[in-house]
Image (tube, grey):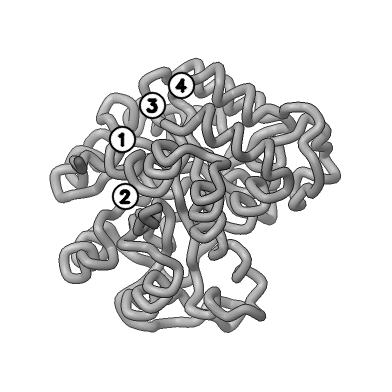
Amino acid sequence: MKKLKKIDMHVHCIEERGIPKLSGHFYPTVKELRKIYDKIGVEKGVLLPPGTCPEFTTERLSPREAEAIAKKYNDTIGWWFLGLDPRFGSNNENTDFSHYINYYKAHGAKGISELISNISLDDGRVLNLFKHCEKCGMSVTLHFGKESHDYGVIDGLHLPKLEKVLKMFPDLKIIGHSVRFWSELDADVTEDTRDSYPAGKVEKEGRVGYLMRKYKNLYCDLSSLSGYRAMTRDKEYAYKFMEEFSDRIFYATDIHDPENINPDNPAYEMLKLSGFLDEACENGKISYDTYEKICRKNALKLLGECEE
C-alpha cells in the first residue's frame, strides 16, 4: 500500500518566535512545524491564524501576515483561513462581513478560521457572520467551549444550536472540532463528561453521527486529542464512521507548540493520527478510497485544488 502524505486542515504557527503564551510555551515557527510534518508524514497544512478573538490571544496574526506566510513558505503552509470574530465591525447583527470576506478571499483565503468567540452559537451576530460566509462560499471551522471563562462558541448538551444553524444555512460548510463536539460521538455523554475525553465502546450513536448523516453541510476534522481519541476509543465504530462519512472528514493535527512532537508532551498523542490512518488502511479496516479522501482529497476539494 502506498502511504499518503497528508494535508493538515488545522494548524497554528508563526513566522518568528515572539511573545510566549501565559503558559510559557510558544506557537511553532514554520521551520519548527516543517520538522514535525516530516516526522509524521504531512506534506503541508492550512494555517488557522492565532489571535483572532480576545478570549484566546497571545500572538496575533493578521490576514496579511497569514497570506505572506503561505506565499513565502508554500511548501509547508499551502493555504490559510481568514480569522473573523462576530463582534468585528459594529458589534451588531448588521455588520457587512462580505466586505471583509470577499477582499481576503481575493487575496487567497480559503475558509473562515477556527471560530473561538465565547458567544452563543445562535447569537444574532454569529448568525449574521454565517449568513455572509454562506453567501461568499466560505467554510467555517467551529471550536465549542464552555459558557464564560473559556474560549469557543457556546452550545448545549447534544448540540441543539448546531442543528439549528445547519438547518438555517444549508449551503454553509461547517467543520466541527474540539472536545465538546467529539464527546457527542456516544449518546451517553452528560454535562459532567462533555468536557472530557470519553473512553470505551460507543454503545449508542450520539449526536455527531446523527447530525453528520442528516446534514450534508456538516464536516469534521480529526484534529487535537479530541479527534484522535474519538477515533481510537472504539476502533471498530470509528472504521464504520470513516467509511460512511468519508467525503466529509479531514485529517488534521491542531499543532500549536513545537514541543507537541516530544513524547512527554500532553498533546503528543494527537500526532499518532497519521499512523493510525495508515494502519487502518494497511489492515483492510478502511478502503483505500476512504483513506485517500480523509488524508488529502477532501481537503484539496474544499480548498479548490485539483488532484488526479
Query: Image point 65% across, 34% down: which residue?
Result: 155
Q: How far is the residue under mark 3 from the one under mark 1?
A: 7 Å
Upstream in the sequence, badge 4 or badge 1?
1
Q: Which mark is residue 138?
A: 1
Upstream in the sequence, badge 2 or badge 4?
2
* Nearest the eye: 154 or 8: 8
Measured from the top left, where is residue 212 in percent x and y?
A: 55, 26
As helix, strand or loop, the secondary structure at mark 2 comes to strand
Number of numbered discs:
4
Q: Which mark is residue 172?
A: 3
Residue type at mark 3: give it. Answer: Leu
Q: How far is the residue under mark 4 from the one under mark 3?
A: 10 Å
Measured from the top left, where is residue 190 in percent x and y?
A: 83, 37
As helix, strand or loop, the secondary structure at mark 4 comes to loop
Q: Is residue 5 above or below residue 168?
A: below
Residue type at mark 1: give it. Answer: Met
Check contact, mark 4 vs mark 3: CB within 8 A: no
* Residue 302 left/right relative to 162: left
Residue type at mark 4: give it. Answer: Lys
